[in-house]
Amino acid sequence: MNRLKQMHKAANTVSTPLDHAVQMRDRSVLQMVEAALKSKQVLLAYQPIMQARAPDKIAFYEGLLRVMDETGRIIPAKDFINEIEQMELGRIMDCVALEKGLRTLARQPELRLSINMSARSIGYPRWMRTLRQGLKRNVTVGERLILEITESSAMTVPELVVNFMAEFHAKGVSFALDDFGAGYTSFRYLRDFYFDILKIDGQFIRGISEDADNQVLTSALVAIAKQFGMLTVAEFVENADDANFLTALGVDCLQGYYFAAPTVRPVWARADEAEIRSA
């Protein structure tokens, strides 16, 4: 790809060993993602988001992008998304994630699922075509689909995001503002966006039961969400003390390894496999 050629050329003109190391790392990441796409080794891992006041009940699932490298290792999106976010490769990965998520929703009529997207994908024809066709093929999908947009991504093109949300809210789609608190949200835009769900960034959640500063900050974020009528989700909940504190604070839903890790073999897939074996 042209991007790889440009990076190869740049690698020959870097001025420091650190520059060279960064160039080689980015090139390796791009090659891994491109190889996974070519061999169709792109997956969704599913993680449940639990109701805080009924922690045995699932509010919805999040579908998290994964790729499989040449050794068979499953690589999470956080290990490559920054390198491809502003490239067309990032848009293609958003398309694949949406296609897989819509297919899962069509097959599992009781499922509610969130899928991550970049605001940049709103202007990408293949992604928009995928979304419109998926909603048209199955009339129940819209009301069970949640699109997650990171705070930093939404702030790049706020007016475009506002118009996009207005159009697809009318089709039943819900929207979540992901990683809230990690960036620099304009509260004017927050008022205009009308997100349905606010996901509080994990940096405020880890160890919150023993961190007075994060307790104050998270309490403020919860108050903001309530003022704007948004459901709150705390990310990266990893122990019982944090889960209990967040519930008492009034957070609506909890997500993290304390409840379940993301898996490429969710309960419905395992049930399908068991049915096939018993047939």
Image (cartoon, grey):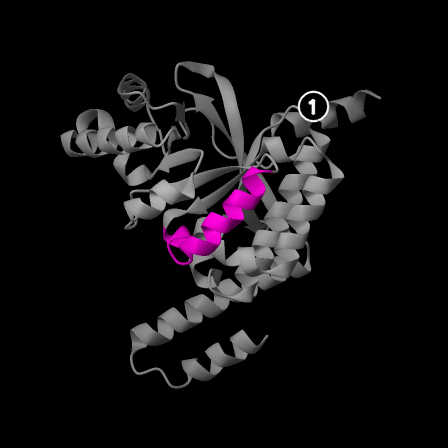
The one nearer the camera, 200 or 244, is 200
Q: Quadrant of residue 106?
A: top right
User: In the image, what residue occupies the spot 50% across and 50% down?
Assistant: 163
Determine which residue is flagged by label 1.
271
Residue 73: image location, x then y, percent: 55, 48
Residue 218: image location, x then y, percent: 25, 32
**Magenta-drawn stretch, dominant element (helix, strand or loop):** helix
Depicted 105 relative to depicted 57: above or below: below
Residue density around tag 1, few if under 14, some if 14–19, many if 20 or more, within 10 Å: few
Which residue range is magenta in the image? 152-170
User: In the image, what residue occupies the spot 59% across and 37% down?
Assistant: 264
Quarter of the rendering occupied by the N terminus: bottom right
Residue 271 lies left or right of residue 250; in this view the side is: right
The answer to whether any part of residue 278 appears in the image is yes
Residue 22 lies left or right of residue 136; in this view the side is: left
The one nearer the camera, 49 or 120, is 120
User: In the image, what residue occupies the spot 63% across and 35% down?
Assistant: 142
